Image (cartoon, grey):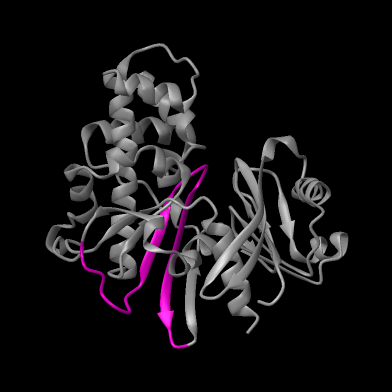
Amino acid sequence: MDAPMLVGDVGGTNVRFALALRRGSGMRIERFEVYPGKEFPSFADALHRYLDHTGVRASSACFAVAGPVKDGAGELTNRKWTVSSAELSKEFGIHDVMVVNDFLAMARSVPELEDDAFEVLFAGEAVPGAPILVAGPGTGFGVSTILPGECGWKVVSGEGGHIAYAPRTELERDLARILTRDHGYVSNELVASGSGLPAVHAAFCEIYGVPMREMPPAEMRTRADAGDTMFRSLIELRAMTVMGAVGDLALINGALGGVVLAGGVTERIVDFLRTPEAFARFADRGPMSGYLRNCPVRLLHDPVAPLIGAAAHFEQSSQ
């Protein structure tokens, strides 16, 4: 990559833009800016704001969107935006535009990052050449798997956050019953992600017999830390949901190269994710419980990781 390329991380809450440029073995990010998505009627409006504000011009771009991508266009799951490579190329005069899933970009960043970008939650020993699972909740619940190969890294992405929620305790079964009544299908995304939190909060209020009052996630966490039983149980349940989901996904994908947790919600509840109970939810698989016992689990902290991954994926795809 000889010239800087425009990259974007288009999430359900925020949209991030930057320029990316390969320097040696690493990818450098410059002119990084973050905008709240709710301020713009469309993705194109947000991109206009960035380009007008920074004066950036680029001949190539890669945008990672939080939703499924088909035929060069991505539909955001938690915002009514469409991001189309053909339309953006025409409107902005960018010669080569690529649109990918955000967790494809997140996963592709993993081999580009230094060790200090990760926090070890559970130590283990990665199996060389085995798949690596990258997953976790933010506004939604992203899932991708990265595979090493002779021609570079290959990322397999889908909508794994929408697999069915699997309750194991009486409280989890009560939650699943209420969510099923109110929402029909209950996914891990509904239970663990930011977009699902209001529904989970309402269900917990019903279970605990307390009045429902809207409040931000930070206040829920403050109450949990102060000893509020309901909110502590709510956060613990969401952490168990994350670890149970990634355990299922690691088992399905044979991801003995390790698990990398990512996403804003994941970072905010990390102390609940590193407990012995959380690891048990990840590894306990009946007759296959030994399969994941030595699988390392790390948390990815780098806020520009999807931008790095988008640039690396575009670069590799163009070779």
Q: Residue 152 at what x, y percent from top left?
A: 49, 82
Where is residue 136? Give x, y as percent. Answer: 42, 50
Camera-nearest residue between 50 and 55: 55
Q: Residue at x 23, y 63 (%)?
A: 295
Q: Is residue 187 above or below residue 199?
A: below
In the picture provided, is 189 more to the left or to the right than 84? Answer: left
Q: Is residue 161 above or below residue 230?
A: below
Quarter of the picture holding the N terminus: bottom right
Residue 138 lies in the magenta stretch: yes
Q: Quarter of the image containing the C terminus?
A: bottom right
For image coordinates 77% across by 40% down, the residue present is: 41
- Residue 192 can be seen, yes or no: no
Left or right, residue 208 beside residue 31: left
Q: Is residue 165 above or below residue 22?
A: above
Q: How many marks?
A: 0
Side (left or right) of 191 relative to 233? right
Whether residue 106 is in magenta: the answer is no
Query: Can you say whether 138 is above or below 199 in the image?
Result: below
**Residue 275 at x, y percent in the picture:** 21, 42
Quarter-wise, where is residue 148 in the image? Answer: bottom left
- Magenta span covers which residues? 124-150
